[in-house]
Structures are given as C-alpha cells and as structure tokens.
Image (spheres, rainbow, N blue to C red):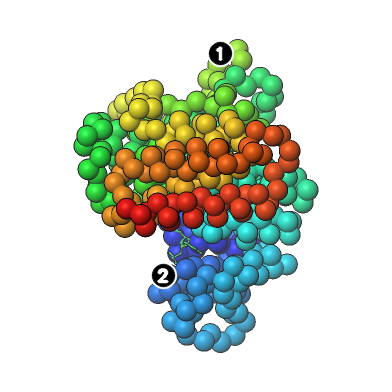
Amino acid sequence: MKRIAILGSTGSIGVQSLDVITEFPDQFSVHSLTANTQIERLKKQIAEFKPRMVAVKDEENVKDLPSYQGELTVHTGIDGLVDVVTHPDVDLVISAIPGSAGFIPTLRAIEAGKSVALANKELLVMAGEIIMNAARKSGVDIIPLDSEHIAIHQCLAGQNLDDVQRLILTASGGPFLHSNREHMEKMSPAEALDHPTWNMGQKITIDSATLMNKGFEVIEAHWLFGIPVSKIDVVIHPQSIIHSMVEMIDGNVLAQIGPPDMRIPIQYALTYPQRLDTPWPRFDITRAWDLTLLPPDHEKFPCLGLAYEAGRIGTTLPAVLSAADEMAVDAFLKGQIGFMQIPKVIADAMSCHAKNEPMLNRHSALSLNAVLAANSWARTYCRERFSAV
Ligand code: NDP
Ligand code: MG
C-alpha cells in the first residue's frame, strides 16, 4: 500500500490522480492533500478520501474550511506544504502545482527521501541540476508524470543509453497549429485555452498554445534521461496518439502509443515498476487513424527556440525562461498583453539577464540561491515591464 501526498490535489493532474487512486484501493491510500483557492473542491476530497493532513497555501482561504474532527490536521503556507510532503508516513509525493510555487516543497520531499511522481516540469526547467542531484543524494526515484516522458521511459526500458541516437518528443501543435501570425496576434485567452486534444490547467494550456510546454519538455527530458538538448527533437503530431519516440543508433525508432487520456500515464507513474489492468478506455485499433507528423514552425512559435537556447546555455537562464513565462502567461490571461507578446517578453528577459549575469557561461555547480535569485529577478523585470504598459 503506497501512502500518497498530492501537491495540487484540486487541479487537473490532482483530480485525475485521485481517479486512479480510487480505482486501486488495495494499492494506494491518500495521506495528504493540498490546494490553494478551490476550497469547496478540497472539502469534497477530504470527505471522500479522509486524508490525515491537508495544506492550503494562502492562510486566508483556510477560514472557509470547517474545523475537522478526528485526526485531520490543517497546515498553511509554504511551510505547511513542506510539512505534509515530508511527513514520515508519506511514501510517494505527486508534485502537481504549476510553476515555481511547488519548488521548495518538492525539493524538501526529495531531500526527505520520498519518491516523487513529477508533473511539475517547471521545476526541472528552473533547477534540474539541483533536483536531480538531491534525488541522487537521497537515493529516491523521480518518476516523470508527463505523457511524453512516460513514453520515453518505456521506450528506454532495457536499452543502453549509449545506443540512443535521439529522443523525439511529439507535440499536438495546440489550437493555433493552422492559424497565421496575424490571427495569432489577436488571439483571446478563451481561444488559446481551447486545446484540441488535452483537458488541462490554464497555465499548461497556454504553454501548449505557444509551444513553450514542448520547449520545457525538451529540458525536462534532458534532466530525466541524461540526454543532451542537442539530441532531443520535437515533431508536431496533432492526433496525440504517439506520445513520443526514441531513435536508436541502428536506425530503429521505438514509439509508445495510446489514447490521449492522462489517467493512463498517471497510473503508470503511480504503479511503476508494476503494471495493473487499466479501467480506462483502451486504444481502439478497429477504427481508422491518421497519424500525421510535421516539423514545428519556429517562426510562428518562437518559445520553442527560446527554450532550446536556455537549455543549451543552462545555469540560471532556464530559471529566467520559466519565471518570465509564468509572468507572461499570467499577464496574457489577465488581458494585459497579447498572445504574441508572450515570447517577446521572455526573449527580452533572457537577453537582459544574459547581459547582466557574468556567471552564465561558467560551468560551476548551480546553487539554490542563484536559481531563486534568477527567478525573483525575472519576476521583477516582468512586473516592471507590465506596469509600464
Ligand atoms: P491546474 O491549474 O489544473 O492545478 C494546479 C493545482 O495547484 C491546483 O490544485 C491549485 O490549487 C494548486 N496551486 C496553484 N497555484 C498554487 C500556489 N501558488 N500554491 C499552492 N498551490 C497552488 O494545473 P495542472 O494540474 O494542469 O498542472 C499541474 C502541473 O502538472 C503543471 O506543472 C503542468 O505543467 C503539469 N502537467 C499537467 C498535465 C495535465 O494534463 N494537466 C500534463 C503534464 C504535466 P487551487 O486549484 O485550489 O487554487
Ligand atoms: Mg506533456
């Protein structure tokens, strides 16, 4: 029986993880849940899953939680998130808070020796070196909770990494695959949130529309599998059936396919290395499928190139990429900037940081302070820029 803590239980990944946990009551129990604003949903989850601990990021939201009887304890703030994931009774932490807010709790969970199913790819973007070093030091597994990386994880099973020619990540292309640039300049948040194949939280849906999500996944794959960014390619595959591929040096290409339903990869991440019968709809081989593969259009989607650049240069530049993206996506959703200004803001933040950060091209170990400083610098840069508009 794995006792699970979920960072972000009220979100898309959190809710689907609880769907999986419900299906396998002999395998999993919910130790703790965390939320931020969706207190009504959290209350229902508490009633159904009876966790021992909950944590709510903003203290003011806790007043909406009734005082619970029994063994449940309620915690607040970042310290509260850290308290629940590091509790001695927790076996596995699902890290599913978007952006940098989940960074410290996830890092502390790894340092406390917890296995982590990592949905929050931004953590590997901003601090992959620190996260992977902490996992090695604690001897814990980081299991990707992202469909592409779970595909690669399965394709690489039993393979020698020296025999890998390249990783090929598939991308749906998002809602603007066939839009022209002029049209994209005027895209509203509602249009950008209308993803053709996946139903996800707002931040990752906008990241998918700009292709920044795929850029983040290139950096995520680099850290998870130890493959250089130069050997990781992206291909557009609108049907989201092939979840990713691995090309071997002898020319064989291994692919993992399945329906676009996150509960299948979530089940894999939670049960690994075991496999269990799935209750979710399976890939229907009796119907006709078109499997299209197209090269990405870097001119229309500059975020992809920005992520490659940050991944290639490394050190603190990916932390600036991630923080500037978080701020730019938030500003777009609030109607403060247009869709095509998202890559512009991020590119400007990166080049300003590159000019002012003499450490950028040195190959010394990355410190936690340097990452946090770069994250905070990029937020201030963006905030000042938006307030000047
Ligand atoms: P959602 O926006 O749906 O959910 C986010 C969760 O995090 C909610 O529980 C939310 O609480 C909580 N949260 C948000 N901000 C904070 C904060 N500042 N402090 C504490 N908790 C916070 O996101 P997703 O589930 O879609 O995505 C989660 C992560 O998983 C992202 O990093 C994403 O890139 C990754 N991912 C998602 C996939 C998907 O299919 N959705 C696929 C692969 C990766 P509340 O709602 O209560 O405010
Ligand atoms: Mg993905």
* Residue nearer the viewer, 202 or 251: 202
Task: Please name the residue that numbered disc 1 is placed on.
Answer: 251
What's the CA distance linking mark 2 and mark 1?
49 Å
Left-right relation of 53 to 67: right
Q: Residue at x 47, y 48 (%)?
A: 324
Please identify the quarter of the rendering in which residue 105 is found: bottom right
Left-right relation of 7 to 185: right
Residue 21 position, x and y percent, is: 53, 59
Mark 2 lies within 8 Å of ligand 1 (Cβ measured):
yes
Q: Residue at x 60, y 63 (%)?
A: 5
Tag 1: residue type?
Gly
How many neighbours does mark 2 have within 10 angstroms: few (below 14), some (14-19), or many (20 or more)?
few
Give SS at disc 2: loop
Residue 20 position, x and y percent, is: 50, 56
Mark 1 lies within 8 Å of ligand 2 (Cβ measured):
no
Task: Please name the residue that numbered disc 2 is placed on.
Answer: 38
* Residue nearer the viewer, 387 or 197: 387
Residue 333 position, x and y percent, is: 32, 54
Tag 2: residue type?
Gln
Left-right relation of 71 to 332: right
Eye-nearest disc, 2 or 1: 2
Query: Quarter holding the N terminus?
Result: bottom right
Residue 186 position, x and y percent, is: 22, 43
Please identify the quarter of the rendering in which residue 212 is found: top left
N-terminal of the two: label 2 or label 1? 2
